[in-house]
Structure formats: structure tokens, C-alpha cells
Amino acid sequence: METKKKTLKISFSTQKGGVGKSTMTTLLASVLHYRLGFNVLVFDCDFPQHSLTNMRERDKKTIMQNDYHKKLAMKQFQTINKKAYPIIKSKAENALEMASEYVSQSAVAPDVIFFDLPGTANTKGVLTTLKMMDFIFSPITADRLVVESTLGFTKAFLGLPQTDEGNPEQEM
């Protein structure tokens, strides 16, 4: 009997910007991929800034312009025998479909897919995407406004009706 592993879908999500969603996504994705050996995929859905995609492009450019950094990068990837994990730019409304397509076409299925979403539920596709997550973490800062906003968002999100429809994304 062949067992199929399930790809975990994780998002750091709150209604407040600047509390560390993208930072936490990057840190956890990097630890899982580079230190623990998991296959990781990141969807940068934080339109319009797409900070993770822009950071990756900036880092690649910096590495390619400096021989010392090229050697360090080469050594790192040879040591761990892995390439950098992919970061795919997407809008929240298309992220699940794009993730499903990526997984179906990938030679090695990701163990974990992170979705870096915008800091507002008013963005098209955010709530639909969040409903499909296996885990949602809400980073907060020690600020009354942030805590109240996060608790309000969590309460509203948990109050949404359950969806019973069969989605192909659930098979990831």
C-alpha cells in the first residue's frame, strides 16, 4: 500500500502590518529548509510590496556582483546539497490554484508551503486562502491596538461558515 504524504500549508496572518509576518515566514521556511532538510515553497501574496520576492532578488543580485559571496553561496548549497527554496509571487486569490499546479508539476513535492498574505482581510482571496491552511499563526506585538485587532480578526475568522466543498488544494 502506497501512502501519499500531505503537504502542510502554513500562514502567518493578522490584520495588522509590521508585526513580523514576512519575517516569521522567512525564518521558519529557512530553518525548515536549510537546517532540517524539508522541501519548502513560499508564496509571496503580500501585494503590492511583495517584500519576500524583492528581498530574494536583491540578495541574488548582491551575490552575483561579489566573488566572495558567490563562493560562500556555492559552498552553502554544496554542503546542504539543496538549492534555495522557491519564492513565487502571487495574489492571494490565485495562490491556492498556483500552489496546487506547482505541486502537481514538481518532481519533489514540498513538505511545507508558506503563504505570506497581506495584512488585511479585505484583500480578495485572503479569507478563502486562510480557510485552506493547516496552521495559521498570528504574530502580535505588546500593543493594545495590535492585540485587539488580532483578537477581533481571529473571532471573525472563526465565525465564518465551514466549507464542505471538495477542493483539489485539500489534497496537497
Image (tube, helix red, strand yellow):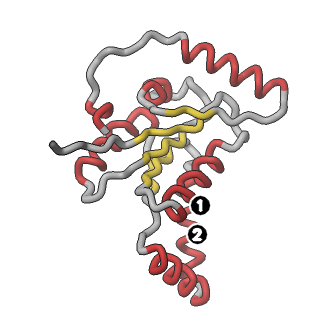
Answer left or right for 78 relative to 169: right
Question: Could you say which disc has been placed on residue 55 in the image?
Answer: 1
- Hey, which residue is sitting farthest right in the picture? 143
Give the residue displayed 58% in from the left and 67% down from the top.
58
Left or right for 38, reference 61: left
Where 39 sits versus 94, above or below? below
Which residue is rendered at x = 48% and y = 45% of the image?
114
Give residue 118's position: percent from left, percent from top: 57, 36
- Labelled pair 1, 2 in contact (Cβ < 8 Å): yes
**Residue nearest the observer in this picture, 146 or 35:** 35
Tell me the SS state at disc 2: helix
Q: Mark 2 points at which residue?
A: 59
Q: At x 84% / y 30%, what residue is drawn?
A: 143
Disc 1 marks a residue whose amino acid type is Met
Q: In which quarter of the image is the N terminus?
A: top left
Q: In which quarter of the image is residue 169?
A: top left
- Badge 2 amino acid: Asp
Taking the view exactly as shown, the residue that stands out farthest to the left is 1
- Of all residues, the one furthest to the bottom in this rendering is 67
